[in-house]
Image: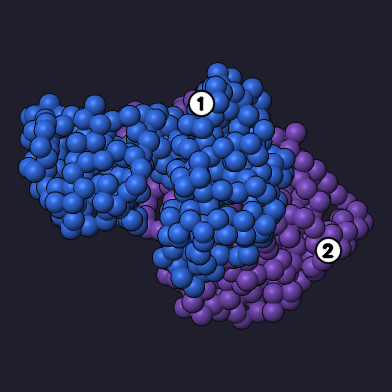
Chain colours: A purple, B blue
Amino acid sequence: MNVAVLAHERFPDRAKTAVGVLRYAEYDVTAVLDRDCAGERVSDHLSDGQDAPIVAGIDDVPHPVDALVVGVAPVGGDFDESWRPDVRRAIKRGCDVLSGLHYFFGDDEEFTTLADEHGAELRDLRRPLEDCTVSEGRAHEVDAEVVLTVGTDCSTGKMTTSAELVAAARERGLDAALVPTGQTGVLLANWGVVVDRVPSDFVAGAVERMVRERGDDHDLLVVEGQGSVVHPAYSAVTCGILHGAMPDALVCCHEAGREAIHGYESVEIPPLSEVAALYEDLAAPVADTTVAAGSLDTSGLDDADANRAVIEYATAIDAPATDPVRFGAGELLDALD
Amino acid sequence: MNVAVLAHERFPDRAKTAVGVLRYAEYDVTAVLDRDCAGERVSDHLSDGQDAPIVAGIDDVPHPVDALVVGVAPVGGDFDESWRPDVRRAIKRGCDVLSGLHYFFGDDEEFTTLADEHGAELRDLRRPLEDCTVSEGRAHEVDAEVVLTVGTDCSTGKMTTSAELVAAARERGLDAALVPTGQTGVLLANWGVVVDRVPSDFVAGAVERMVRERGDDHDLLVVEGQGSVVHPAYSAVTCGILHGAMPDALVCCHEAGREAIHGYESVEIPPLSEVAALYEDLAAPVADTTVAAGSLDTSGLDDADANRAVIEYATAIDAPATDPVRFGAGELLDALD
């Protein structure tokens, strides 16, 4: 499937869905839409994953594409009206729209009318499950080893680490699968539930259901975590996933140098050892689990500093650590054995 | 307002909404519907709150009533089809229906058609907010002291303790208000948000909004907690409320003798000191708060055992404790000063 990825004014640093699609999805990315860096290429910004031209709008995409993927997620998941002309023209070309926003394209009168006229599908990945259920506390019964990525904040590499872990495990011949819980993960796997949209009563239940649906068919399930247990706004999501997944092990994700919650600068991230302990203590009543490894995003550092930062992080959380993008996920996988 | 309260086969032990309405709401309860104990009276089961006859169905309610209140909340919040005849006949009599179920009466074709014909209103208290927002982490800015009730499990007296605290504070001349987060609280206060229905991303935001909406107009806000941080299914709700409310103090609610999570008997409640510490540790990154008091449900014990149990509980959580229903909420209020 050929796709164009919308990332206006945000590529690559504030367009983690776009970056995830470029790195891990099986779609062919024909172009990235970002009016701020039109004329450049993805490879000018990212050293790995697919390359593609960056263009100013959908009319500049060189080939026909099957779908427009919304590759950004502003705070609150709102639609930015400045995207409307591109979305409109994409639908007129018959493109499907894949979105993980809280905003539903399927509820937008202009888009649904156009989609009907032009035979396009509007896929809102965040639309809640119709048949939510509460957790029964039984995710631990599955045959697979269940690993959950957790973090010190949003955007600390939980999705990336999960995808890298699955890829590395498969390279070793393990039957590994991703349990996606966010818009990018669901986009990549074309399966899963965007749990931050699920009513809070049913978050654990939604995760439990996914784990039980796939858990007997694989050796390893890597559950994509969300948010952080120390995040003032999103901790409910994090906590529900932790208790719903009942993981055998946790991989704690952090970005080197980050000291406060992004967007909530008055909220300091506690000492890393305390964050790790808090995850273990919070899990304990429901699942006996430990932080078995750490994943550090060192993309802002040079190799020497990255090495130092990884060693410091491993010491802080008292577990093996690496940056799976820079150094590969092998060490994480070793720590999970 | 005169109401009948539906509690079939569950009154009083599994009908906590019904009991809350009888104890704390300003409605006049004309009758309780429970086909299993028809002919008895509320006072045969409860020693406090309003008395009313218990009848087998809506046709046996002696006087006309303004509304039928759904006073039970089965697991998952489903509608029990055995209630349909009573609901149907109530609407035909022009009664409104007030419900906190996950099931929406307003989406039931038979009920909406009947309601239109008979001028009745179907009020689904759990219907989600249309305009959810993420928390800004600012609830601590309000003038009021903010107290949150938390617990070792569901149904350990968080709503009751919250209502008793507000009543006791008002008796002392404080301007106190309840911030309701569950169906019973919203029913009692005729205001609030049933947060377990709110998408998990927005739970903290919904609570923050309520605290900020009322927090500068009162001396004391008592936020009704939900679930438990050690509950395998509902901890997401609990965690979102804790971080959204940013409370100055916590009151930890427990039922004497309860050792496992109700309905999840393999999940033991950890030692009470650990539960209290977990709440404090989980709150700490967002709000510096402590368990300032404990509320113990001793309804299953005689006075001597209740006294002993309260002392043991206070020792376990290292804070003053009482049973506010049996002994009054004065001690809790003292501990919050």
From the image, tell me which residue sits under label 1. B170
From the viewer's perspective, is the residue at label 2 or at label 1 nearer?
1
Q: Residue at x 69, y 44 (%)?
A: B290
**Local crowd size for mark 2, using a 10 Å CA cut-off: few (<14), some (14–19), many (≥20):** some
Task: Return the x and y of residue A296 as percentages of the image width and height.
Answer: 77, 57
Do the residues marked 2 and 1 share a common chain? no
Instruction: Name above or below for residue B213 compared with residue B18.
Output: above
Give the camera-side residue of A13 and A44: A13
Q: Residue at x 14, y 48 (%)?
A: B55
Left or right of B242? Residue B190 is: left
Q: Residue furthest front?
A: B304
Left or right of B102? Residue B193 is: right
The disc labelled 2 sits on which kind of residue?
Answer: Ala
What's the chain of the residue with tag 2? A
Quarter of the image with the C terminus of chain A in it: bottom right
Instruction: Name above or below for residue B266 compared with residue A312.
Output: below
Task: Return the x and y of residue A328 as percentages of the image width and height.
Answer: 75, 66
Q: Secondary structure at mark 2?
A: helix
Say which mark, if any, is on residue B12.
none
**Quarter assignment of residue B180:** top left
Say which mark, if any, is on residue A314.
2
The disc labelled 1 sits on which kind of residue?
Answer: Arg
What's the chain of the residue with tag 1? B
Q: Residue at x 66, y 59 (%)?
A: B316
Q: Residue at x 54, y 77 (%)?
A: A144
Left or right of B122? Residue B293 is: right
